[in-house]
Amino acid sequence: MRSTAWEPVAVLLAVVVGGVLLLHGVGVAVRAVREPLTTGPFSGGFEPREHPVSRFHVRWYPVTMVFLAFDMEMLFMYPWTKVVPEVGTSAVVEMFLFLGILLAGVGYAWREGAFRWT
């Protein structure tokens, strides 16, 4: 039996098309039925003032950035505690330099009014 050079390509194409059709079929089979969102009282029984899937106001951006900066500070400080006994004074100096730079950034943001709500 003689094989052509296009048979492997045709088999691969058939497998790919079959896989795509199979994935599409599984997606259609497990698709969730979307219904309108309904909201009820929460937070002490008050009616919500905005939609539950609404976006946050842009004024939360600086607060989020400061939180992430301090979160990263904590992420760096946990392994630092293990290194301090081995490295010594230079590790302490480096950490306080890092904290000083972070604090300078917060001071700059505060001075520029990034944390004002009005």
Image (cartoon, grey):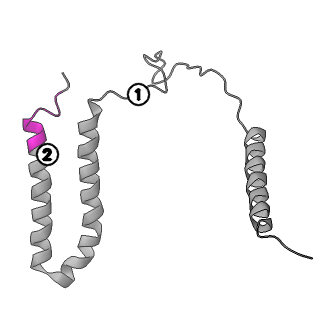
Q: Is residue 111 magenta?
A: yes
Residue at numbered disc 1:
55
Instruction: Based on the picture, tell me whether residue 56 belongs to the magenta stretch.
Output: no
Q: Are marks 2 and 1 in contact (CB under 8 Å)?
A: no
Which dot, 2 or 1, sits closer to the camera? 1
- Residue at left offset 24%, top offset 52%: 70
Instruction: State left or right for residue 64 relative to residue 2.
Output: left
* Amino acid at pointer 2: Val
**Residue 83 vs residue 32, the one in the foreground:** 32
Element assignment for label 1: loop
Question: Percent position (x, y) of residue 4?
Answer: 81, 70
Q: Which residues are magenta?
A: 108-116
Front residue of this view, candidates 40 and 98: 98
Which residue in the rendered view is the most extreme toward the bottom?
86
**Above/below status of 115 relative to 96:** above
Q: Position of residue 65 (x, y in %)?
A: 26, 44
| In this view, 84 is above or below 60 | below
**Above or below — where is 22 with respect to 61?**
below
The residue tagged 2 is 106
Q: Residue at x 14, y 59 (%)?
A: 99
Q: Give the numbered dot on residue 116.
A: none
Q: Residue furthest right?
A: 1
At a point 20% along the width and 81% down the height, the residue shown is 85
Residue 8 image-quadrant placement: bottom right
Which residue is depicted at the point 8% across and 50% down? 104
